[in-house]
Image: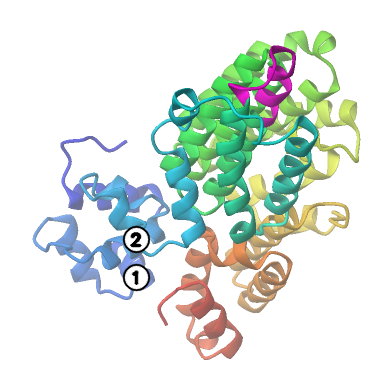
Amino acid sequence: MTEPTQTLGERVAFHRKRRGLSQVELGRLIGRSESWVSQVERNARKVDRLSVLAQVADVLGVPVTDLAPDVPTEAVASESEPWRDALRLALTGHPALSAVASAPTADSGTSEDFGERTEQAWTLVHGSRYSEVGPLLVSLIADLEQALRSVPADQRTSVAEALASVYQAAAAVLAKVDDMEAAWLASDRALFTAEAAGDVALVAAGQFRLALAMLSAGRLQQAQHAATTAVTALRPRLPGLGIEATSVVGALCLVRAVSAARASDRRTAWQAIGDAEELAATVGAGRNDFNTEFGPANVALHEVSVAVDLGDAGDALDRAARIDTAGLSPERRARFLVDVARAHAQRRARGDALSALLEAEQVAPEQIRDHPKVRTLVRDLLQDLSQRSDQELRALASRCGVPI
């Protein structure tokens, strides 16, 4: 792992090797020469432009702050969508402070109203409709923090449960758009609020969102630890905790599987998939406890993802061909198609990879255009001279913000 004392060049070299790229390959992906990469890694050349630094970080699959910790988060996010800035600000400084300092009010909403709005928020999250869910989450955080301190004592548990779910939704959407610091903060708030509600399964769901945020940020050891800790604590108690807790533990097993696969730990990855399969058989199809969508179909999707991360493209495509995604959310179907595209790319089937990406974009456009793995894959496809002139690929690259 990188150390605080390392230079920018040393950090770039570390993450390049971690991704298995040569200096020539990294240079090709960012439109630079091997000499340029070598000079940066030897600290013989400075990278003064934030846009260039962001491009390098994007290709390496890490936040800009992993390469340059001194870069202000505000500078990195200065071109982000307004909803993202508003949601980040809603999490900045504890929102409960204004609620504590204010006089109690009964105008923030009822338990029924909160439930409907929270359900609406999760529908938008699962639909990858981020620009719509962002403003809704901002208002829900403010209203629920106020209500938690103003409703009668017998209603506080239900309000706390709704607030924990809203923070989990915020964590989910922020992780999807690669805003890891804010996603971690939202996850931590979800855990704290769920504990206050006294719901063990809801606490585990918060831990699941935290583990996902770490996984999205490439913090594989931390993601594995967060998921394993929760599974170890809860799995022996599942008979007394109910089917909802079983769903969350199963979802945590899937985080374990993916984090292990990305760390090239084949044995742990497939062992975790086996654990998830056992739990999915208990849960059955058609459930969505704590918005995990955990069940047999979701496990099958993760088998494809694990196979791709382990470099087993043929196995991934064989498994993908047997999956019916009709009952899954747009977010899950789009993620599945990205994994299919990655598998095709590993087999040099560039046209099939592009077709899968375009289909994924039709299903969940905001998710695909904001996805770091999609941008990396599009860059890879653009390096193929036979593909570079493809107008559909060039148009997709433009929509994803990938330089042509």
What is the x, y in percent for residue 168? 61, 36
User: What is the number of callouts on the image?
Assistant: 2
- As for residue 9 lying within the magenta part, the answer is no
What is the x, y in percent for residue 273? 72, 34
Q: Which residue is mark 1?
A: 30
Judge the density around disc 2: few (<14), some (14-19), many (≥20) Cα neighbours within 10 Å: few
Residue 190 or residue 239, whichever sits in front: 190
Span highlighted in magenta in the image: 148-162
Mark 1 or 2, closer to the camera: 2
What is the x, y in percent for residue 110? 75, 33
Q: Give how far apart the Cα atoms at labels 1 and 2 are.
A: 21 Å
Q: Which residue is mark 2?
A: 78
Question: In this rendering, does residue 52 appear at all?
Answer: yes
In percent of the image, x 59 and y 60: which residue is there? 131
| Quadrant of image for the N terminus | top left
240 with respect to 206 (left or right): right
